[in-house]
Amino acid sequence: MVKEGSREERIAILGAGISGLSLGWLLSRIGKQVTLFESTDRIGGLARTFDWHGVPCDIAPHRLYTQDQALVAMIESLVPLREHRRNSRILMKDKVIADPINPIELILKFDPKTAASLIMGFLARPKLPEDSFEALALNRYGRGLYDFFFEPYTKKMFGVPPSEISVTWGREKLRSSGLLDTIRRSSKTFFSTFHYPADGGYGQIADAMHAHIRGEVMLESKVTGLERTENRVTAIQYRRHGEAHRFECDRVFTTLPATLLGRMLGEDFNLRYRGIELVYLHVKKPRVMPYQWVYFGDGDVVINRMAEFRNFHDPEAQVDNTVLCAEVTAETDRPVEDVLSALERYGLVDRAEVDDVMVLPEGFGYPVYDRGFEAVKARAEAVLGRYENLHSVGRNAEFRHIEVDEDLESALATVRRLYPDATPNAAPDAMPEAIMPEARPGA
Ligand SMILES: Cc1cc2nc3c(=O)[nH]c(=O)nc-3n(C[C@H](O)[C@H](O)[C@H](O)COP(=O)(O)OP(=O)(O)OC[C@H]3O[C@@H](n4cnc5c(N)ncnc54)[C@H](O)[C@@H]3O)c2cc1C
């Protein structure tokens, strides 16, 4: 067997989304040769960008927010970034309100009956055992705001009521503690500025990582199985252009959804991902709205969130068309019709202005934190942990609701743990010192 940590190690990376590319980039930096296997004909996964009608389009809005300046610097070493002031809103009950939600504004803006139920609900907050997202939201905000916003929005987002969602979701996502606490803070929910590539779309980050990889990125190569001994993966099986192949390896990094990997190991992990349908609309006017993205809070509107990509790019650019991307999480057989109706209802778009439509399904949009998922996830980690040379990295592999910066952070932590003594190679395209493990103590 090839000695681990040596130059000849054969490394397989499953998936060429941002997590696989981050691993490939970081491992290349320390002199490793890697082979990435990607089932589709393109790189970038959920963090890719494609061109449509001359507009760089992402998978819904993608923006970079982290308080870790070393990570921003690391990404900036690959791609010039521009800092944007966040300009987003929530559309609800035919009104435009602040994002994140500001209960005081709701009280002032909505009818007296709604205002009274928000205030009374808040004053009569229960003290329920916090065993679900419902209990947590009721304890923090009261019945009024729960019924007004959290219940319909959660159902639309995850397909089940908040009583079936784990309290972990609320603890990770709700940073505000109550009605009076409406101050914007620096968090994934309450950020006021964000970074985005200065040119092109978010997928520039994936493209730049790809350009630095030493080894091969095998597109249209679908991983179908893992050969293994009791505690090691010895080879991966994949299909390419209709033919079955195998790749012997010393180490495997997986970024594939944990459920897929489980099946390859003969295990059924009862974890759920929420699929999304992205409805792209080409609109024959320079701008539809001044916002980068808007949320739709109403339970009867199928859109969860909608982005206008032009507003991530040069605001001064003279253009005569724009692209919207509506993220549909609710169940519907007619996503395009439902999106157009919602936009007409809010006076955003007249359907006569839309001259092209495209629907893109993504089966693994969000890991869903169903009640009890923690135990299933712990079992999955234990099963995968039996294989000493198998490492899970990224949002769907780790079943964590994380973003690109955290995928990169996870890749970095994994590489640091496995190769603590690695040194940067001196290749002419060497990446900046910032990515080296020792430059990020405690990361
Ligand atoms: C709607 C939405 C909005 C988001 N907004 C933001 C944001 O604003 N900012 C941000 O930073 N992040 C955001 N994210 C999160 C971000 O997109 C993800 O964290 C990141 O893209 C996950 O990357 P990944 O490589 O782990 O997974 P993926 O992107 O899912 O990549 C996995 C790759 O594996 C491939 N694959 C699957 N099965 C196989 C197989 N059998 N064989 C070979 N290859 C396979 C897939 O084709 C894919 O390319 C958002 C995500 C979504 C869905």
Image (cartoon, helix red, strand yellow):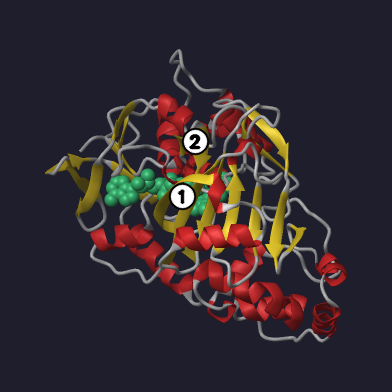
Which of disc 2 and disc 1 is earlier in sequence? 2
| Left or right: where 45 falls relative to 183 | left
Question: Where in the figure is residue 414, as x and y percent of width and height?
Answer: 46, 44
Question: Where in the figure is residue 403, as x and y percent of width and height?
Answer: 55, 49
Numbered label attached to residue 394 = 1
Is disc 1's CB within 8 Å of ligand 1? yes
Numbered label attached to residue 203 = 2
Res 111 → quadrant: bottom right
Question: Where in the figure is residue 19, as x and y percent of width and height?
Answer: 44, 43
Kind of residue at disc 1 = Gly
Is disc 2's CB within 8 Å of ligand 1? no
Rendered view: 345 above or below 135: above
Residue 410 appearing in the image: no
User: What secondary structure is marked by label 2?
Assistant: loop
- Farthest residue in the top direction? 428
In this rendered view, identify the residue nearer to me: 347 or 28.
347
Check if mark 1's residue and mark 2's residue have beta carbons within 8 Å: no
Q: Which quadrant is home to the N terminus?
A: top left
Q: Which of pointers 1 and 2 indicates the residue nearer the eye?
A: 2
- Farthest residue in the left direction? 243
Q: CA distance from mark 1 to mark 2?
A: 16 Å
User: What secondary structure is marked by label 1?
Assistant: loop
